[in-house]
Image (cartoon, rainbow, N blue to C red):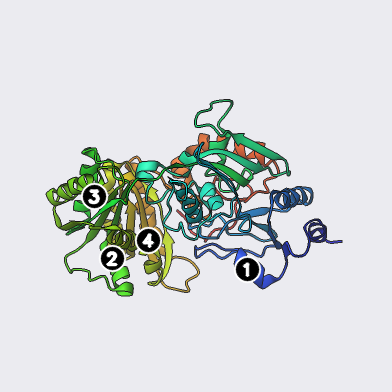
């Protein structure tokens, strides 16, 4: 009897997919990386399905790749040969929403925007707001510690997680954290699992902190600049002035051209960057006007504050179009460096210089208020991997980010794509400690092997290239 037959008996044929064409659609994410040939896909609908799958995988030594909606940009859900893909997309219950305690308990397949809408029915909000919030899942956000547009004020996903229900590699169920705002009993296992990319356990529910929703619609401004560096300087000045924006997004000329070519936004010839900022405070209009003046003082050629919710939605919607518009231009290597906010102008300059030096199209957007930049390296559709000049430009960008005191990833995760640079940031001691943590939770190395941390024996094959 084949090992997979035992899994089918445990879960039923409806839960275990073995059709190769269907498997292939679950084996990849939104990167260009080609997956291997997984053994099967499990369509988990409950915690018990996850428990049964991991017990079976542990018994038969089969790798398991957890998966949400497949919207990841770092290869974290790309499956290798012989693995079982564990899809959590059908676990969509909001088990609890308590307005009194300002918490929600959500399963991993809940769409991020759906949780926010449910909270707003009670005058609350779920603060994390990735650009893909209408399609990305809570489980995927937890796996990568996703940030998003509102993280400049409210923090990243980890800042909204109080506790987790996790199935460990051997099928045991671990409850971490609490329902209270405060709690320091034991090690912070909750924080350890958030951002671990499914390498330590499979999250089947999360207790999430909700916040009071703003009393009225936010006030939004848009400013156009003749240079990216001026826009970066304006961001630094806004933060230094204590304006406390709830959103601060930067789009470069290449990104604006991509959006203009798709949707026709009337882009002016001299506009090299656009800054979109927002305040959801009680004095939001006054704060937006203050940020408007700071932009003008820092060289903005045009700046205006929205006059109502319609204009606000239009401006924020423009930012959310950035990646899909860029995808229309070619295949994309989407990167995710983060630097101290004071270093934002220098990082922007470095990206521009790398693009010019190597003749590479780079479309850059940024969660500018917290120094998180997304340079998107565009190359020819259909290419198996980025050409050498793209890798060379990416090397420069990552190296400069680290020189400026930054990090390789602010919110997308390491996945497979950033393995090649990981040692530059973490160093040998950190790598050894992280491998030790991995061994405690997953001694057989079956959970999402080769992702998140540099592992010595089970890193999946990467596009060949010498650093």
Question: Residue 256's mark?
Answer: 2
Count of picture labels: 4
Q: Give x and y (percent) for residue 288.
A: 22, 48
- The residue tagged 1 is 24
The nearer-to-camera label among 1 and 4 is 4
Figure check: 40 above or below 206 = below
Q: Are marks 4 and 2 in contact (CB under 8 Å)?
A: no
Question: Residue 232's mark?
Answer: 3
The nearer-to-camera label among 4 and 3 is 4
* Mark 4 / mark 2, whichever is N-terminal: 2
Residue 112 located left or right of residue 291: right
Residue 117 located left or right of residue 273: right
Question: Residue 6's mark?
Answer: none
The nearer-to-camera label among 4 and 2 is 4
Q: Tag 1: Cα neighbours inside 10 Å, few (<14), some, or many (≥20)?
A: some
Q: Give x and y (percent) for residue 327.
A: 41, 68
Q: Are marks 1 and 4 in contact (CB under 8 Å)?
A: no
- The residue tagged 4 is 320
Q: Tag 4: Cα neighbours inside 10 Å, few (<14), some, or many (≥20)?
A: some
Residue 43, quarter of the rendered image: bottom right
């Amino acid at each position: 009897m084949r090992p997979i037959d035992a899994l089918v008996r445990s879960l039923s044929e409806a839960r275990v997919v073995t059709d190769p064409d269907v498997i292939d659609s679950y084996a990849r994410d939104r990167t260009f990386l080609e997956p291997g040939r997984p053994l099967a896909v499990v369509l988990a609908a409950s915690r018990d399905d996850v428990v049964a799958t991991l017990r079976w995988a542990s018994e038969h030594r089969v790798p398991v790749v957890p998966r949400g909606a497949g919207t990841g940009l770092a290869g974290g859900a790309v499956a290798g040969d012989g693995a079982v893909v564990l899809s959590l997309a059908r676990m969509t219950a909001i088990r609890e929403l308590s307005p009194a305690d300002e918490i929600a308990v959500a399963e991993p397949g809940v769409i991020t925007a759906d949780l926010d809408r449910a909270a707003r029915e009670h005058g609350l909000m779920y603060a994390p707001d990735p650009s893909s919030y209408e399609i990305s899942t809570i489980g995927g956000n937890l796996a990568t510690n996703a940030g998003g547009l509102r993280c400049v004020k409210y923090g990243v996903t980890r800042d909204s997680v109080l506790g987790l229900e996790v199935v460990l590699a051997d099928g045991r169920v671990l409850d971490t954290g609490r329902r209270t705002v405060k709690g320091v009993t034991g090690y912070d296992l909750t924080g350890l699992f958030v951002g671990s990319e499914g390498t330590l356990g499979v999250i089947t529910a999360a207790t999430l902190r909700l916040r009071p929703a703003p009393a009225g619609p936010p006030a939004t401004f848009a400013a156009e600049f003749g240079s990216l560096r001026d826009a970066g300087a304006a961001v630094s000045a806004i933060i230094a002035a204590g304006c406390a924006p709830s959103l601060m997004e930067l789009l470069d000329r290449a990104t604006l051209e991509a959006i203009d070519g798709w949707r026709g936004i009337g882009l002016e010839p001299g506009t090299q960057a656009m800054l979109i900022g927002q305040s959801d405070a009680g004095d939001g209009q006054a704060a937006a006007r203050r940020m408007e003046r700071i932009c003008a003082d820092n060289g903005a050629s045009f700046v205006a504050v929205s006059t109502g919710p319609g204009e606000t939605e239009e401006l924020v919607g423009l930012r959310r179009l950035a990646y899909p518009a860029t995808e229309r231009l070619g295949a994309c290597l989407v990167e995710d460096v983060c630097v101290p906010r004071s270093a934002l102008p220098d990082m922007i300059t470095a990206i521009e210089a790398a693009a010019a030096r190597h003749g590479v199209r780079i479309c850059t957007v940024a969660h500018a208020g917290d120094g998180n930049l997304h340079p998107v390296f565009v190359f020819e559709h259909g290419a198996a991997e980025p050409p050498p000049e793209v890798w060379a430009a990416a090397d420069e960008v990552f190296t400069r980010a680290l020189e400026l005191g930054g990090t390789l990833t602010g919110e997308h995760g390491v996945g497979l794509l950033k393995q090649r640079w990981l040692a530059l940031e973490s160093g040998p001691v950190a790598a050894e400690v992280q491998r030790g943590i991995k061994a405690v939770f997953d001694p057989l190395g079956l959970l999402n092997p080769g992702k998140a941390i540099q592992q010595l024996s089970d890193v999946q094959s990467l596009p060949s290239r010498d650093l």
